[in-house]
Image (cartoon, rainbow, N blue to C red):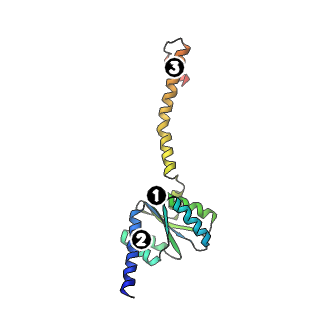
Amino acid sequence: MSVEAINAKKIVVEEIAGKFKDSQSAVLVEYRGLSVAEVTELRRALREEDVEFKVYKNKLVQRATESVGYADLNDQLVGPNALAFGKSDAVAPARILAKFAKDHNALVIKAGVVEGKVLNQDEINEIAKLPGREGMYSMLLGMLQAPVSKFARAVKAVAEAKEANGGEAPAAENVEEAA
């Protein structure tokens, strides 16, 4: 093997290791049996969520995982595999791949890494059920708004009771009933 070929492989291993380090998550899938059109459709769905989908030689991925401490993934590096790297949303790769796998049996989720922890297939599928970043934000906003809206209803009830009593403050038990 020439020196150039060895250097090229080292560069690819460093690239893969860098992607593992820079990503919030990575999911390893086997894509054997998917048509070119299906892979293109999958890549488009992943790209929309800022997820990079790459195919590398298993041996190079194995060297990269060993260098970054994810050697537990190496048992899954059999057959034609691809990696989906989630840059901005840790849940996105698992969610998109799991949704795609429901309609395309040829796509098999094998394992992954989420926020530095190596996860098996079942754990990745559980993470796929979580809402995305936007869903989490809306849930948080709803939780934060709940006490404010309850307070607003109580204030409104006091104001309405005050109007009904001719300008006098209502008794505490009347406010609780109205709220």
Instruction: Return the disc, 2 or 3, that comes first in the chain's sequence.
Output: 2
Q: Earlier in the sequence, mark 2 or mark 1?
A: 2
Q: Secondary structure at mark 1?
A: loop
Tell me if 68 is positioned left or right of 26 in this view: left
| Residue 153 appears in the picture as rendered | yes
Query: Which residue is denoted by mark 1 in the rendering?
Result: 90
| C-alpha gap between disc 1 and disc 3 | 47 Å
Q: Label 1 neighbourhood size at 10 Å, few (<14), some (14-19), many (20+)?
A: many
Q: Quadrant of the C terminus?
A: top right
Residue at the spot of label 2: 16
In this picture, is 131 found above or below 41? above
Amino acid type of the residue tagged 3 in the rendering: Ala
Q: Is residue 166 above or below residue 19?
A: above
Instruction: Name the residue located 54 percent from the left edge and 55 percent from the top edge.
Output: 129
Query: Who comes first in sequence, dot 1 or dot 3?
Result: 1
Are the two marked residues, 1 and 3, in contact with CB atoms closer than 8 angstroms? no
Amino acid on which disc 1 is placed: Ala
Q: Residue at x 50, y 44 (%)?
A: 139
